[in-house]
């Protein structure tokens, strides 16, 4: 079995594998997955050597966490999230999609970043996951892009209450590391200026299509000892032959950029998805790259892409073509 390299989250002692399993898909993201297929996917990931899995109450309104609780070995590093609480509802008709998840569990989500909201979310997650502790707890989807005019309210609620709840849980040993799970870096700077955190799970912002964190954000993380989990390395599938860019139809300039990226990769005999999966890990603050998987076949594909040899000349050509920031660290060859 291939052994994925491990790195420590901040200075917490919590370690994550270089390739992580994003469990939104087994919460029926966009399409239903049977219990049996979800269990087989998790088993395939563990068998492949993937020992870090991320989930959240949002994923299938508790379905992803519940499925992991039924199948996940205790020795796998696990992150989940808080900031939404789930309340029971009448089960919707079969085939109902809510918040992007089809046939989720019969709960509705509500934002709550207060002390009591974080505690309730955490306690409910423990029940679904059948665990006594969670390795990493992330405040989920803070930020102006998510909350708009309610941003300041939710941020202050978190800083004055929810953050203390996470710190207390960590002090009690019920959490190993705390941080944020977000899609934007501005909120990370706001929180880091007010509090000590260990990790940021940053989705879609450090990829072959986007390298804005090189403008100083990653340097600020390094200075504060904050690790980065780079999620969504394919930008919602665009870098892996998908049709979506950040959950929407791609603009023309992104389509053109992907065509050019593919051409450079093809010239070196490398799938674009392999380059996309391996690229983020070259930065020293990035400890894991996290991607969603909904079948054993996807686990096998992603594991192979992670190990695919990439010659140094490919990265040099991407920079020469203006397709990759000159400031971006690039991967060294991985041992197969």
Image (cartoon, rainbow, N blue to C red):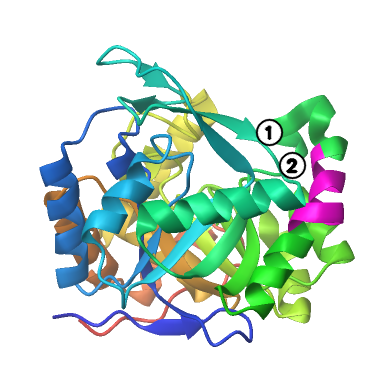
Tag 1 residue: 146
Front residue of 92/312: it is 92
Mark 2 burial class by Cα count in 10 Å: few <14, some 14-19, many 20+: many
Front residue of 185/279: it is 185
Relative to 89, say whether 121 is above or below: below
Relative to 167, say whether 111 is above or below: above
Q: Is residue 26 magenta?
A: no
Residue 208 in view? no
Mark 1 burial class by Cα count in 10 Å: few <14, some 14-19, many 20+: few
Q: Residue at x 27, y 49 (%)?
A: 67
Q: Which residues are magenta?
A: 154-162
In which quadrant will I find the N terminus?
Answer: bottom left
Residue 146 horizontal/vertical position (percent) = 68, 33
Does dot 2 land on a helix, a strand or a loop? loop
Tags 2 and 1 in contact by the CB under 8 Å rule? yes
Q: Is residue 155 left or right of residue 178?
A: right
Tag 2 residue: 143
Front residue of 124/246: it is 124
């Amino acid at each position: 079995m291939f052994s994925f390299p491990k790195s420590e989250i901040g200075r917490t002692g919590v370690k994550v594998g270089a390739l992580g399993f994003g469990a939104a898909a087994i919460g029926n993201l966009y399409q239903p997955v049977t219990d049996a297929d979800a269990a087989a996917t998790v088993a395939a990931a563990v068998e492949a050597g993937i020992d870090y899995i991320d989930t959240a109450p949002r994923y299938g309104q508790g379905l992803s966490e519940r499925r992991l609780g039924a199948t996940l070995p205790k020795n796998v590093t696990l992150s989940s999230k808080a900031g939404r609480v789930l309340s029971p509802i009448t089960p919707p008709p079969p085939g109902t999609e809510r918040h992007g998840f089809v046939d989720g569990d019969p709960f509705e989500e509500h934002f709550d970043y207060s002390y009591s909201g974080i505690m309730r979310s955490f306690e409910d997650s423990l029940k679904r996951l059948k665990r006594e502790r969670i390795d990493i707890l992330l405040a989920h989807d803070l930020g102006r892009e998510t909350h708009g005019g309610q941003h300041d309210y939710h941020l202050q609620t978190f800083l004055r209450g929810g953050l203390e709840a996470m710190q207390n849980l960590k002090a009690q040993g019920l959490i190993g590391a705390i941080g944020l799970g977000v899609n934007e870096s501005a909120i990370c700077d706001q929180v880091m200026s007010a509090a000590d955190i260990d990790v940021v799970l940053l989705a879609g912002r450090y990829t072959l299509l986007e390298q804005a964190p090189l403008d100083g954000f990653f340097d600020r993380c390094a200075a504060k000892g904050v690790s980065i989990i780079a999620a969504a390395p394919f930008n919602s599938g665009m870098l892996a032959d998908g049709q979506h860019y950040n959950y929407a139809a791609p603009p023309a300039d992104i389509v053109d950029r992907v065509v050019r990226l593919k051409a450079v990769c093809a010239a070196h005999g490398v799938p674009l998805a392999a380059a996309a999966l391996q690229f983020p890990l070259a930065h020293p603050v990035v400890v894991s790259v996290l991607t969603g998987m909904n079948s054993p076949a996807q686990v096998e594909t992603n594991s192979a892409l992670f190990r695919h040899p990439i010659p140094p000349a490919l990265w040099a050509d991407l920079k020469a073509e203006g397709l990759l920031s000159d400031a971006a660290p690039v991967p060294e060859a991985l041992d197969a």
